[in-house]
Amino acid sequence: MILYLIKSGLCLAILLGIYVLFLEREKMHRFNRYFLLFSLVFGLTVPFITLEQTITIPVKQLNEQVYEFVVTDYTASSFSDSAEASGSNPLSLSFLWWFAYISITGFLIIRFMSNISKLIKAIKRNRSISKDKTSFILVEDEIVPHSFFTALFVNKKKFEKGAIHANVIAHELVHIKQFHSLDILFVEILRIVFWFNPVFYFYKKAIQLNHEFIADEEVLKSSNPVLYKKLVLSYLNQDSSSMMTSSFNLSLTKKRLQMMTTKHNKLRVWPRKLMIAPLLIALVFAFSEKTSAQDIKEASISELVDQLNTKLDDGKSLTKSDSEKLRSLIRKLQKQKGLMPPPPPKEMTLPPPPPKAMTLPPPPPPRVKKVVPKDNSIKNYQIAVKRYMDLNPKNVSKKELESSYNKVRSAYRVIVKKSKKTDGSKMPPPPPPLPPTPENRIKSGN
């Protein structure tokens, strides 16, 4: 696991360094977007790629040393490893590491779901206007226009007065049409899983800046660069939106302003694109898993035994596959040379297994106090009545008035239902009278 994290982290850092040094300043933003996303996938999967290499192992004759090594030394080392594993302390560094990892990851998942939930609630609570597969969410608060998938959040008063510049709306529509929210969600999930690796933080910054390059480039096709720069700078001191959205003043850096006037240069772009293929091949050879295919030839058997003894002396454990290969070698050489196998070793007496640790009974479950839910029926009714009465019959349709009035009646029925309780509990006070119906309000004009 540690080797995988080191390999993937180094590969991701190298690819990000290549992007910053050679690709970020060039006007090929769509290519850069897919390069960044591919780099994340490539860096996390390249350690799983397996490359096979052929290694020649010289063998000349069979002797008793090999048989003794396979049967006695391997069995003894395997037993000692299993004994150490059975008697190890469960409260080890590995246990503490996994406990800390799961705790922090759980906290980040809760924060991630909370941010998503806030955006969904904002979409449901506020009034929306649909236009060209885009939902304009009219928010009462003073916010910078920002987008999340097909939702575009804008200030209600400015939108109704037409005070939001058309280039700002066009900028956010580019984010929506090119599904930039998917990129942000993808890198946010990776940041949750690999929170201990800071390289994912820099990847998110690079991806968000690339999104702004793409949106600015689309808007500047039909706008004046100087006027657009002034428009972008006018949002400099305003707070950005949620970390899950694409905001108009996000990544407002010197790079973004310089990129607005940078011209496309094919002589510089194509060589940089062509160097990606050999770079990826080199990274595959550098960070992939290497396996060895053994080719047995005539030589001295002592060299093989020395190699395996050195492996044990270095603290490396032999696997069952090593034992099987050696036994297969013995049978092959016996068949070729007609050699007799050496006598089997004496039976080993195994020590008794360690005593099992005593387990304490689980503690009794904690007492849970019964929480009586608070009755909010009167408050909900008052809120529904206020929202209904705030609607001006002259500015809204009859359908909207009826929809709001139905919510008032639903809240009223809840209060009436609770007032008919017969369980001996304290009854709530009777509700105030219903407000005038939509028909009466339309006739009266109030």
Image (spheres, rainbow, N blue to C red):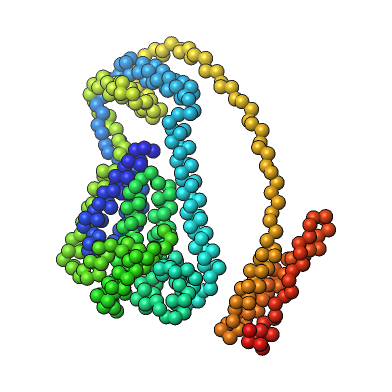
Count the numbered circles shown: 0
How far from the left and from the top, in percent, is residue 19? 25, 56
345 with respect to 6 (left or right): right
Image: 305 above or below 53 = above
In front: 95, or 54?
95
In front: 317, or 159?
159
Query: Residue at the location (60% across, 25% down)?
Result: 359
Query: Residue at the location (39% across, 38% down)?
Result: 1
Q: Quadrant of residue 167?
A: bottom left
How far from the left and from the top, in percent, is residue 390? 60, 77
Image: 403 above or below 63 = below
The residue furthest left is 267
In front: 99, or 88?
99
How far from the left and from the top, in percent, is residue 413? 74, 69
Would residue 39 be seen by someone viewing this image from the given angle? Answer: yes
433 with respect to 67 (left or right): right
Would residue 413 be seen by someone viewing this image from the given angle? Answer: no
Query: Residue at the location (66% across, 69% down)?
Result: 382
257 with respect to 133 (left or right): left
Query: Residue at the location (52% across, 14% down)?
Result: 352
| Quadrant where the C terminus is found in the figure | bottom right
Q: Quadrant of residue 165?
A: bottom left
180 with respect to 109 (left or right): left
The residue furthest bottom is 443
How far from the left and from the top, in percent, is residue 397? 59, 83
